[in-house]
């Protein structure tokens, strides 16, 4: 499998999030400008000639998820191979290179694990992850994933819709948004020992986005328990938004009245909007979003509005200026 950037990509597009952040972190330390140039060039070379992804993390044999409904929602496109899905990741809690999560995420302990549901709901509670899985029938959904970095995959997730779960918790009339928080555990997540982002990672959705039938909490992929590097034991999947909105390793879900802060928006609000819907008409300030590189393909393909899910979600944004509310 080649993960290779085609020749027509502009130079402005070859700076990955990881490299960009390493530059910021590096400069923040007051290192010499010449040394900074060396780091930058090395990173560009790595990105431009990215090696094949590594095998899945050495975190033990895969564990099958036996009871789930197959293909509740699917797409007529080839699935991205498991080794790429589990070996080519952005999960900065384990490092900023694509191969870092597969190499480092074995340190994450996913049991015991619980998720707290709190805020503007009538029934706040903390639920053990295995109880959460038992209480919600699992189904496989094959979704496109579009990264903000202009690469994409097709992934067979296993999980359950978030909306019915939130309904059981009885949101109050003041619940306008849903805020999500990742585990904060620098002893298990080595990337949290750096200042790449403010930790823990936080994300948010408007409540109608969270209630949309496409929004799921995933606990597996390819028929297996979710690999650590993919956000074990439970992560959000919002297929019409850029991938960074789908927060991983969730420990808290809080319904709130006001728009919650989100990690990337806090880092650079001009580059990463709260909504971050996939939109080929709104470029990232440093690269085009009109096309994408499907992992495993050499040529680039056109990016679809809302990642191809416009029929299901475009109505959520009726009347909004999506260039302003990006």
Image (tube, helix red, strand yellow):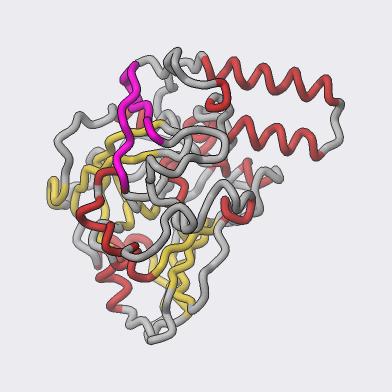
Q: Which residues are magenta?
A: 290-305
Where is residue 60? Give x, y as percent.
Answer: 40, 35
Where is residue 324? Give x, y as percent.
Answer: 49, 56
**In the depicted view, which residue is nearer to us: 113 or 289?**
289
Where is residue 322? Give x, y as percent.
Answer: 42, 55
Where is residue 122? Give x, y as percent.
Answer: 38, 86
Decide if residue 131 is in sight here. no
User: Which picture quadrant has residue 107?
Assistant: top right
Q: State which quarter of the image contains the N terminus.
A: top left
Residue 296 covered by magenta stretch: yes
- What residue is shown at x 45% (from left), y 57% (from top)? 275
75 left or right, relative to 263: left
- What residue is shown at x 62% (from left), y 56% (from top)? 266
- What residue is shown at x 27% (from left), y 45% (from top)? 157
275 left or right, relative to 302: right
* Above or below: residue 323 compared with residue 206: above
User: Which picture quadrant has residue 145?
Assistant: top left
User: Which picture quadrant has residue 171?
Assistant: bottom left
- What residue is shown at x 45% (from left), y 59% (from top)? 113
**In the depicted view, which residue is nearer to us: 38 or 290?**
290
Decide if residue 193 is in sight here. yes
* Above or below: residue 268 compared with residue 49: below
9 left or right, relative to 199: left
Residue 237 covered by magenta stretch: no
292 left or right, relative to 81: right
Q: How many marks?
A: 0
**In the depicted view, which residue is nearer to us: 82 or 299?**
299
């Amino acid at each position: 499998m080649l993960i290779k950037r085609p020749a027509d990509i502009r130079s402005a597009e070859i700076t990955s999030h990881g490299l960009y952040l390493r530059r910021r972190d590096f400069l923040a330390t007051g290192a010499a400008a010449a040394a900074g140039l060396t780091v930058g060039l090395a990173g560009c070379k790595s990105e431009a000639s990215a090696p094949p992804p590594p095998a899945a993390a050495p975190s033990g044999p895969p564990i099958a998820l036996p009871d789930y409904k197959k293909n509740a929602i699917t797409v007529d496109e080839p699935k991205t191979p498991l080794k790429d899905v589990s070996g080519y990741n952005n999960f900065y809690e384990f490092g900023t290179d694509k191969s870092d999560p597969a190499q480092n995420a074995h340190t994450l302990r996913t049991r015991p694990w619980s998720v707290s549901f709190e805020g503007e709901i009538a029934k706040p509670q903390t639920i053990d992850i295995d109880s959460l899985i038992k209480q919600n029938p699992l189904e496989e959904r094959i979704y496109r994933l579009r990264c903000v970095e202009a690469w994409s995959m097709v992934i067979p997730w296993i999980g359950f819709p978030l909306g019915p779960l939130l309904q059981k918790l009885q949101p109050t009339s003041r619940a306008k948004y849903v805020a999500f928080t990742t585990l904060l555990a620098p002893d298990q997540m080595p990337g949290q020992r750096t200042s790449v982002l403010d930790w823990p990672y936080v994300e948010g959705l408007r409540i109608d986005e969270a209630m949309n039938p496409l929004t799921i909490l995933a606990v597996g992929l390819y028929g297996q328990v979710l690999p650590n590097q993919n956000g074990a034991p439970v992560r959000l999947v919002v297929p019409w938004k850029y991938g960074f909105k789908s927060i991983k390793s969730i420990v808290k879900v809080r319904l709130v009245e006001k728009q919650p802060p989100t990690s990337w928006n806090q880092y650079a609000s001009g580059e990463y909007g709260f909504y971050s819907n996939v939109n080929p008409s709104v470029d990232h300030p440093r690269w085009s979003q009109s096309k994408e590189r499907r992992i495993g393909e050499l040529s680039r393909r056109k990016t679809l509005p809302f990642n191809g899910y416009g029929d299901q979600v475009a109505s959520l944004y009726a009347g909004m200026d999506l260039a302003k509310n990006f």
